[in-house]
Amino acid sequence: MRFIDNPYQCPVTRTMSIIGGKWKPIIINCLGDKSLRFGKLNQLMPAISNKVLSNELKELEALTLIERTEFQELPPRVEYKLTMAGQSLLPLMHEVAKWGNSHLAKQLETQLH
Amino acid sequence: MRFIDNPYQCPVTRTMSIIGGKWKPIIINCLGDKSLRFGKLNQLMPAISNKVLSNELKELEALTLIERTEFQELPPRVEYKLTMAGQSLLPLMHEVAKWGNSHLAKQLETQLH
DNA sequence: AATATTAGTTACTTAGAGGTTACTACTATT
DNA sequence: AATAGTAGTAACCTCTAAGTAACTAATATT
C-alpha cells in the first residue's frame, strides 16, 4: 500500500500510509522488544515469502523503524530489532492485538473463508 | 487485502485480515459515533472513488461492523453508522490516530513522497 | 424539456503489491 | 565431492484491489 492522498491531514490516513501494508504491523509485533534473525522472522510468519520479507524489512529500515545488524560470522547472521521510533508503535500494536483477541474478531476471522 | 494465513493464531494477523484494507480504518474513524450519508463520507475522503467506497461499505456491513439505513425519500438518503461491534474498534482507532499525530509520523509522511 | 440531487452501478482498465522458483556466497562437516 | 546452513537476490509471473468514466432511477424545480 503506497501513500494515500491526505488533504485534510487525517492522522489515521497518515498512520495507514506508513504502516498500512499487509505485513508491516505483523513484523513490528513479532519483533516486539526482541532482536530476531531473518530466518526466525520467516519461521514466525510462515505465510510470507523471503522476497517479500526482505523487501518489507528494507522499507521498515528506510523508515528508521527497525535496525539491521550484520555479524561477521559464517554462516551469516543478521539481526533485526525495533529502533526507539519503532518501539513507539508498540502501544498501538498492543491495541491491535487486544482487538484481535476479542470474541468478535475470532468470529469474523472464520467468516472470511 | 484478503485473508492472511494465520497458523499461529496471531491476533495482529487476525485484526489485519479483517480491517487491514486501505480504506476500512479510515472509514471507521470517519464514522466515529456519527451517522453519515454516502455523499458526506465521499466528501470527507475525497481520494476514494464512489465505486470503492460503495464496495468497502458493503464489506463492512457484511462484517456487521456498520449498519446501513435507507430512508424512503427523494432524492435518496442513506445513512451509515457503526454498530456496537464496529464501535469496539474505536479505542484502536484512537490509538492509530494518536500515533498519526506524533512528530515522527508527520515527519515520515513527508518522506513517503 | 432540461437540470439538479443522491446513491449508487456497470464495464472496462491498470498499477503494483505480492508470489514462485531457482540461484548465490562462503565455509564447515560428513 | 556432496551436503548443510544462512541470508538473502534475480527473473519472472499473476492477481486483484483500486481507479476511471459514463450511466441510472425517481422526482422536484427552473
Image (cartoon, coloured by chain):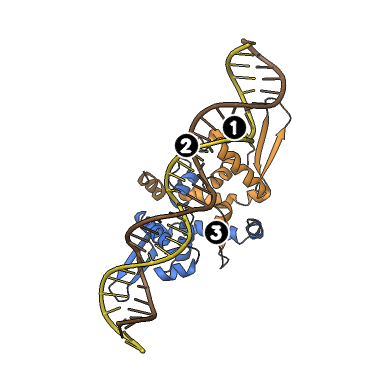
Chain colours: A orange, B blue, C brown, D yellow
Category of crowding for the residue at label 3, using alpha-carbon neighbours closer than 10 angstroms: few (below 14), some (14–19), many (at least 20): some
Q: CA distance from mark 1 to mark 2?
A: 17 Å
Q: CA distance from mark 2 to mark 3?
A: 31 Å
Q: Amino acid at mark 2?
A: Tyr
Percent x, y of residue B52: 42, 59
Q: Which residue is mark 2?
A: B8
Residue at x-position 66% and y-position 45%: A61
Residue at x-position 42% and y-position 61%: B53
Q: Are marks 3 and 1 on the same chain?
A: yes
A51 is higher (above) or lower (below) than D2: below
- Label 1 SS: helix
Q: Nearer the viewer, mark 1 or mark 2?
A: 1
Q: Which residue is mark 1?
A: A39
Q: Which residue is mark 3?
A: A4
Q: Amino acid at mark 1?
A: Gly
Front residue of this view, candidates C26 and A105: C26
Category of crowding for the residue at label 1, using alpha-carbon neighbours closer than 10 angstroms: few (below 14), some (14–19), many (at least 20): few
